[in-house]
Amino acid sequence: MRSVRKVSTGALVALAAIVASVLLTGAARADEPAPPPPALNGLIDPALLQSVQQSIVGVVVIWEEPQDPFALAPAPAPAPGEDELPVMTICTGWFDSPTTIVTAGHCVDPKEGRQALDSRSGPAIDPTTGAPAANQPARAEPKRTVWAFQPREMQGAVITAPVIVRVDSFRSADEGDTAKLEMYGLPPAKPLPIAPDEPQLGETVTSIGFPGLNIDSTDGVDVKGLVSGGKTPAEVLQDSRLQPVNTSGTITARQFRQGVAVYQINADLAEGISGGPTINARGEVLGINSQMTVPFLGQNFNVITDTGMLRDFLGQGAPQPGAAAPANEPSQVAIENTAGGSGQAAPLTVVIALVGGAILGAILMWLFARPRTSRRTTTGTPADPA
């Protein structure tokens, strides 16, 4: 008599489920792209940084004296030596959504534009004392035209020709130093994610922006052609080959400026980089490059905007619990911003794995779980079990 080891139906079902799960997991993992390499010494991965730069925008503001539409006589001719041509300021911006650009508030603040126009002829002098005049007469708000451009060599650029953008809203330098610009009629851009949490002291960061001081030293922006009146802003920016630069440092302190929270960093900031993003190793924006103070002696005082304040200005509200990505891992939004980034198995592969696992499980259940009947002789006497 041979003994038979009976297998319970529950065990067979469990076995079938395990096999199906293995097939599904293996198919999904085989189709997933390799995860981005971890950050090196806290710095952003070069491939991710290259992708982030596709979301960087040059912001050029043209300031001009306004024309009074009710004036009965033409404006008086400028005094000898006074430049009547417009003033150009250069900043940096970045896409926070497919159709909007974020930059620093002081870049588009009319008060800053008025100061730039008035600085051409120097400060007003009190004729009685020879000292700078204490009370300046009220001046009309200057005419502001904001252009956005991306270098023609930039791979993945959305702005292939300079465009005029609209200032949707802004906060002055003393109130948060943030601004949002809107563009129309262009393909959707790749936005940068905002960090869900505030940065920590000592955290490594990377600041990105266009170096305004390099426009004369590189094939950047033909300032001479613009100020001479020989070229329009569109023509000047169309020929620009100025590239954004990045500089790394750490969060050194949380400070307050005019009662507004800011973060002090030791990454080198330069003129023109204002408005660009400072990001963490995961490619998330921690703040806007806001202020650079160069003392006669001592260390530069470089400041970015507060992360929470930036989220509030952009209407993103408080982050959800657990929204932060693990340390040294790019955020999901940053991964999607890279070429070919997915992180999910192809739908067809998942379906095939599910169907295959179900069929195999059903076959195993049918083979091992069907009932066994005793063989009987023609006389009705039970035979020995097999």
Image (cartoon, rainbow, N blue to C red):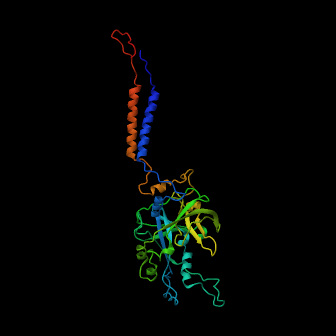
**Towards the viewer: 1 or 324:** 1
- Residue 293 sits above or below residue 348 on the image: below
Would you say residue 127 is visible in this rendering?
A: yes
Outermost residue to the front: 41
**Towards the viewer: 265 or 189:** 265
Residue 325, position as x, y percentages in the image = 53, 52
Report the quarter where the N terminus lies: top left
Residue 33, position as x, y percentages in the image = 43, 50
**Towards the viewer: 117 or 239:** 239
Report the quarter where the C terminus lies: top left
Q: Residue at x 64, y 74 (%)?
A: 297
Q: Quadrant of residue 122?
A: bottom right
What is the count of numbered marks?
0
Q: Quadrant of residue 290?
A: bottom right
- Residue 282 sits above or below residue 12 on the image: below
Q: Residue at x 52, y 87 (%)?
A: 82
Residue 139, position as x, y percentages in the image = 57, 81
Q: Quadrant of residue 30?
A: top left
Residue 329, position as x, y percentages in the image = 51, 53
Would you say residue 97 is visible in this rendering?
A: no
- Residue 21 sits above or below residue 77 on the image: above
Q: Residue at x 42, y 75 (%)?
A: 234
Q: Is residue 326 left or right of residue 225?
A: right
Q: Is residue 128 left or right of residue 166?
A: right
Outermost residue to the left: 378
